[in-house]
Amino acid sequence: MADLLISPFADFEFMRRALVGIVAIALGGGPVGVFLMLRRMSLTGDAMAHAILPGAAVGYLIAGLSLPAMTIGGLIAGVIVAVAAGLVSRLTSLKEDASLAAFYLLSLALGVTIVSLRGSNVDLLHVLFGTVLALDDQTLLLLATISTITVVALALLYRPLVLECVDPTFLRSVSRSGTPTHLVFLGLVVLNLVGGFHALGTLLAVGMMMLPAAASRFWTNDITVMMIVSIAIGIASGIGGLLLSFHAELPAGPAIILTAGGIYGLSLLVGREGGLLWLAWPGKHLEA
Amino acid sequence: MSTASVRFDGVTLGYGRRPAVHHLDGTIPAGSLMAIVGPNGAGKSTLLKGIVGTLSPLEGQISRETERLEPIAYLPQAAEIDRSFPLSVYDLVAMGLWSRSGLFGGIGRKDRGRIEEALAAVGLIGFERRPISTLSGGQMQRALFARLLLQDASLILLDEPFTAIDAKTTADLLDLIRRWHAEERTVVAVLHDLDMVRRVFPETLLIAREPVAWGQTGEVLSPENLLAARRMVEAYDPHATACQRSAA
């Protein structure tokens, strides 16, 4: 048993690095995902993940597979798309989901085109699906920094974030912090996606955000507990996915997301808050 | 307790260029208990949004005179809250302390006592840990009144607070409104129940886009005025030209 679970991490440095990276991503991505879900912005997260691609691709075009260039490029592209989609939905009759869909499809096509201009298919795969088993010191430091910034920022913004979800009219009547809060939150989403991008690629980065969050909704009705559960599920998916990929020789990124998907499926079935089995067999009704 | 009055100078509020409230002049004196009455689409909710400041006037000015600038306690029509959000009744009510605790301030023992008091005042003891998704319409309205209590504001705006609320809850919440009035807070409520307005509210504004009458409830709610309000034309005039009346 110990051989199966522990020795892969004990014997191989790349497995330990991958584990540290995933834990960092789960720490930031879990709570951000919970807020995305509660604000009904799950698909926004997905769209933004795609939007990062052309920026990272331009960075790649200029400097090759360089961490700072691709990070800065991704951040800029993510922010541009978030702001542009927000502006289009405010200024025209197109809703935000439709304008985001338009922007992210454009971004994805543009990004793949830019990468193909210079690189090989290997590089394209690297950008789309990440390299969780090849995280260097620089990248780990970046991931840890991002999760630290995220946790601190969420702690500071906690009240207006919650209030803006539950009762935006009330928040507007007592404070002007609604719009800045929303903008900082979008910034955190982009930041975490850029971090996740290095490990899991643009297509899967959002998986470490949304799957643990969606799964956690089936276990609790308390938002604080929900964030902790989603972090725990993220870390468990990381460990499980890495072991799965190690033993079954599967690609690591998809294995991690598949594990998260498995936990989501399990929660959907047996989760104590609205899981399907509890809905099907709720037990006899109560006295009062 | 500080006092608050609201003055309207030639106020027109609306959406696009279409007026929903057209050329309103007058003052809500500090400490008054006032009802806003009128047909659907008369601009009642729009007027409250104008006072809160979430909607800027197309013309004219709304000015609030208070001793210190403090937030208004505003209860919008019930539909605007996300009831599926995982939040407890206690936390919902505690939001009323925002103007004191703000973004980061802690909630101390004294504050917890006040939250308990507010819950007791609306009869929601025992509901503290319940998620808001499990509340009935009346219980939700009680919780929102508890939040208003905690806001401790000198100006309180209520938008149709008793729509779809049963008699017992309405009576309890009306008692709170009377208490606020006795404490010399300014209370403005949009209402449809004219009997209730006559019974509880000394002052009334009858509005049908244009202000119809404003003053003592008994005089305002005369048969002639009510008939005039009912004649309001709700549909837009597609050929409307720019309004020529000048602001006062």
Image (cartoon, coloured by chain):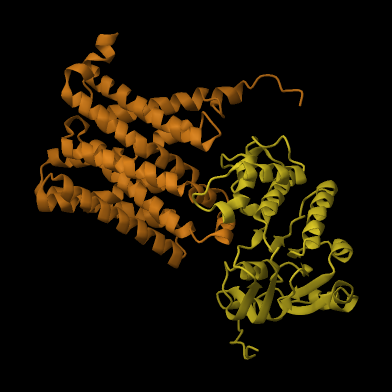
Chain colours: A orange, B yellow
Instruction: Indicate left or right for A147 with B194 as reference.
Output: left
In-front residue for pair B200/B234: B200
Dividing the picture into quarters, in which one does residue A280 lie?
top right
Q: Residue at x 10, y 47 (%)?
A: A64
In-front residue for pair A32/A64: A32
Dividing the picture into quarters, in which one does residue B3 lie?
bottom right
In-front residue for pair A248/B154: B154
Residue B20 visible to the viewer: yes
Which part of the image, by quadrant, shows the C terminus of chain B?
bottom right
Q: Residue at x 38, y 44 (%)?
A: A152
Give the percent coordinates (x, y) of residue A217: 50, 33
Give the percent coordinates (x, y) of residue B93: 64, 46
Residue A112 visible to the viewer: no
Give the percent coordinates (x, y) of residue A243: 27, 20
Give the percent coordinates (x, y) of residue B102: 53, 53
In-front residue for pair A74/A232: A232
Q: Residue at x 64, y 44 (%)?
A: B110
Instruction: Indicate left or right for A30 with B147 as reference.
Output: left
Position of residue B73 relative to residue B164, above or below, is below
Position of residue B42 relative to residue B245, above or below, is above
Instruction: Indicate left or right for A257 with B212 as reference.
Output: left
Which part of the image, by quadrant, shows the N terminus of chain B?
bottom right
